Amino acid sequence: MSMKKRNIVIPAVLSMIIGIVSFTNFQQQDNEPWRQDQLIEPSALAVILNDSSAKQPLIYSIGFGGGIKNSIVEGPVKDSVNLLKWKNELENFPRNTNIVIYCGCCPFEHCPNIRPAFKLLNEMGFTNQKLLDLSHNLKADWIDKGYPVTAKK
């Protein structure tokens, strides 16, 4: 290879490598166990729940209470006892099961439950899990909007 071609190729390759490393570091800084495409908007889940002909996901409340129609209350999975109990329940499902999790106690950045729950789903090899995108909390982002809730007894 001539010196002139080498002077063009080497900087181009180095530039590509730096770009890839920068992108990878940017992704890792996010440091969340879910991808953006694994978030489901409350309005989208409400449409599914209101459509009796739609395939219904398993919905787990992994926080301090339930509230969403058809959700299964696991309790706060920040507690290792609840996390282990949930793990044992999940063992019975195919890894492509459509699962939606939510907590709703507070915004994501403060929630102690969603990260351990989502990490567990990833570690167990689930491939169709979603996190309900509650930017404020369950009341503001679900209940106050009139989305389907569990009937009170």
Image (tube, helix red, strand yellow):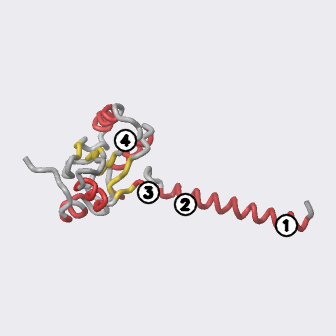
Q: Quadrant of residue 109?
A: bottom left
Label 2 and label 4: CA atoms lie apart by 30 Å
Quadrant where the N terminus lies? bottom right
Where residue 16 appears, as percent x and y from the top left, is 70, 62
Q: Residue at x 22, y 43 (%)?
A: 73
Q: Is residue 32 left or right of residue 90?
A: right
- Badge 2 or badge 4: first in the primary sequence: 2
Q: Residues within 10 Å of mark 4 (few under 14, many from 20)?
A: some
Residue under numbered circle 1: 7
With 130 as the anchor, is 146 left or right in this view?
Answer: left
Residue name at image x 32 percent, y 50 percent: 112
> Which of the 4 quarters of the picture holds residue 110?
bottom left
Identify the residue at image location x=76%, y=65%: 12
Q: Is there a contact, CB below 8 Å, between mark 3 and mark 4? A: no
From the image, tell me which residue sits under label 4.
97
Reading the image, the residue beneath label 2 is 26
In the depicted structure, whether residue 62 falls above or below residue 29: above
Residue placed at 37% from the left, 44% from the top? 116
Residue most toward the left? 153
> Circle 3 is placed at which residue position?
37
